[in-house]
Amino acid sequence: MTKLNWGMIGGGAGSQIGPTHRISAGLDGHFLLCAGAFDIDPDRGKAFAGSLGVSADRAYGDWREMLAAESARDDRLDLVTIATPNATHYEISRAFLEAGFNVLCEKPLTMTANEAREIVEITKESGKVCAVNYGYSGYPLVRQMRAMIANGDLGKIRLIKAEFAHGFHADAEEADNPRVRWRYDPAQAGTSAVFADAGIHAFHMACFVSGQTPTELSADFASLVGDRQLEDDAMINFHFNGGAVCRLWTSAVAVGRMHGLTLQVFGEKGGLSWQQQHPEQLHWTPLNGRTQILERGDSDLSEQAVRASRIPIGHAEGMPVAFANIYMDLADVLNAQRTGAKPDPMALDFPQAEDGYWSMRAIEAAASSAKANGAWTKL
């Protein structure tokens, strides 16, 4: 298989997410890092590109220079990953999509629902792929949950309980740390802080595994540390279009909680429970039966879970491998695009622009509901 040409914007030296993308994209050998604009400082970005083995003629000072140069190349990029600050996602994604590039954008896709809707429309018009990195949906046992629910193993879904709660912003003395403060500044973060940053992953997971979308929500936002303008704790109730009720808690002040991403789904015939800090196991309890532990790597799991597993049972996989499943899906779709073939249907599970749009609608509706003392708000 010919490797796909891949480029990055952002994710340079000191980035939290950049190394994960590079590990994940390279894991299966589908992508070759050919180009990048890695830093807001042009010289620093070019030097970092060189350290990664990117040739000097494809080490760019900024994304505009990268767009102009790559658009003129015969060996242009097959995929561009955008890992820049949130407020830049819309402008960069739009520009590359309109120029005919496929895009994988870090979440949030945009800062507003209107911007996200524009990206969805541009994606459809261009015929290109726009993926959003809700990378936790790449975990094999999350895909097992989705497959079991779609197969009817749980019967009608009644209740979903989703959490993403940590305590890393609980120290009042750290409230003015620039790495923390921006998250609670509406000018930089938008209308929501912890729900838009962390809770939105739990929201996407609830939609992803259940196959349902929300029709209305009621939100309670709280700012519990200092004089933060945006929430550092939130509880949100959703009504889904398939009849399920979802209870979502997200927090940045839950001292003692580390990552805290968990998902439980309860149906007429049984329940499922998964924790991102223990991703190798999925707890399955049939109605009136005993709880069973499904292990990642078991041969009798769903095709989706087997496809997403790389190493034998008993050897732990992790977040980069979950992200790698998003890149594997994209490689399948882009190679099919290149050859005119149809991609594996299981490759179409990657989060797309529509997921980014739903997320922004949920964020804006939750912020509006919270301001109205939890009034039920239509999406």
Image (tube, helix red, strand yellow):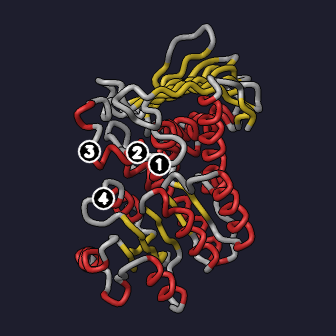
The answer to which of marks 2 and 3 sits earlier in the sequence is 3
The answer to which of marks 4 and 3 sits earlier in the sequence is 4
Give amino acid for label 4: Ser
Front residue of 263/328: it is 263
Front residue of 195/204: it is 195
Front residue of 16/192: it is 192
Q: Are marks 4 and 3 in contact (CB under 8 Å)?
A: no
Q: Are marks 2 and 1 in contact (CB under 8 Å)?
A: yes
The answer to which of marks 4 and 2 sits earlier in the sequence is 4
Crowd band around label 3 with a 10 angstrom C-alpha radius: few (<14), some (14–19), many (20+) = few
Number of the front mark, 4 or 1: 1
Q: Which residue is mark 1?
A: 189
Q: Which residue is mark 4?
A: 15
Q: Is residue 360 above or below residue 260?
A: below
Q: Residue at x 63, y 23 (%)?
A: 374
Q: Is residue 379 above or below residue 219?
A: below
Q: Residue at x 54, y 24 (%)?
A: 235
Give amino acid for label 3: Asn
Q: Which residue is mark 2?
A: 183
Give amino acid for label 1: Ala
- Answer yes or no: is residue 98 visible: yes
The answer to which of marks 4 and 1 sits earlier in the sequence is 4
